[in-house]
Amino acid sequence: MMLPRTPSFRLDGRRALVTGAGRGIGVALAAALADAGADVVLVSRTVGEVEAAAEAIRATGAHATAAILDVGDAAAVAAFFDGEKPFDILVNNAGTNRPKPMQAVEPDDYDAVMGLNVRAAFFVSQACVRRMIGGGVRGALIHIGSQMGHVGGPNRSLYCASKWALEGMSKAFALDLATFGIRSNTIAPTFIETPMTKPFFEDAAFRASVLDRIKLGRLGTVEDLMGAVVYLASDAATLVTGTSLIVDGGWTAD
């Protein structure tokens, strides 16, 4: 009897780009892809952190380089991809949040959040995809969304708007790109404890309100997302497109 073989989760020989890769979730996702064998390019607007992250990955024996790119500058994005060989994997991780009640949101808040979380993700994807198609690459787009792209939340009107938009955008990408063998999916985490978010959880009432909604009873860690990104990038997910992998400890199941 011939047993079916489990598809490989290895990414050897593939090139991956991770945006917003200087800290937190971005570093973890880049490290996970590199550990699976991908040659990873980490990009950020500033040189210090992203260079240090790439060096730390290389110290493990994996392959990583750093590049400076403002993903909000569409012309710079286009020029960057024109100067690169096609990538096999894109992780749209760069993002921001300005939590406040909807009645307090100002136009500059809107432009900042929607500009980075939606507009930049769109045009980074577009530039990457054009090179994929030109090179005949059957690639994977992975967008880092949020559980807030599936539910609402107080003081999160802008963030929810951007992450719901990202979900719809990814589904439409999946339909446009299916004939080229290019997949588009999102990862939708719950609250992840990172150096940037840690100060928020020093507010005992806020921490308790979050943990009350996460049914598994703990905050997320960056490690919780590392397997998810490798899966969606790998041959194990070749029939997975236009969907969202929700990593929320049961928040949206309620």
Image (cartoon, rainbow, N blue to C red):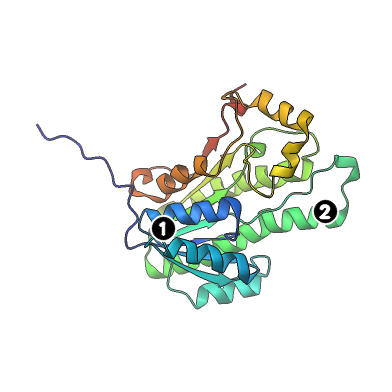
Residue 173 x/y as whole percent: 53, 52
- Of 57 and 233, nearer the camera is 57
Name the quadrant of the N terminus. Answer: top left
Could you tell whether 206 is left or right of 90 in the image? right
Q: Residue at x 12, y 35 (%)?
A: 2
Q: In the current view of this chain or complex, which residue is farthest to the left?
A: 1
Q: Are marks 2 and 1 in contact (CB under 8 Å)?
A: no
Name the mark on residue 181.
Answer: none
Q: Earlier in the sequence, mark 2 or mark 1?
A: 1
Give the class, few, some or many, for how many residues have Cα within 10 Å of label 2's Cα (few <14, many ≥20). Answer: some
Residue 78 visible in image? yes
Whether residue 193 is situated above or below residue 54 in the rendered picture: above
Residue 111, x across and y down, in percent: 79, 57
Q: Is residue 229 above or below residue 34?
A: above
Q: Residue at x 58, y 33 (%)?
A: 248
Where is residue 212, by image quadrant? Answer: top right
- Which of the pair 142/204 is nearer the observer? 204
Crowding around mark 1 (Cα neighbors within 10 Å: few <14, some 14 to 19, many 20+) is many
Residue beneath label 2, please? Answer: 109
Residue 103 x, y percent position in the rendering: 90, 41
Left or right: where 188 falls relative to 231: right
Residue 226: give x, y in percent of width and height.
47, 46
Question: Helix or strand or loop: what does disc 2 sit on?
Answer: helix
Q: Amino acid at mark 2?
A: Asp
Quarter of the image for the C terminus: give it: top right
Circle 1 residue: 34
Q: Is residue 243 visible?
A: no
Task: Report the front residue among 114 and 12.
Answer: 12
- Residue at disc 1, secondary structure: helix
Amino acid type, residue under disc 1 in the picture? Ala
Q: Alpha carbon of mark 2 to alpha carbon of mark 1: how far? A: 35 Å
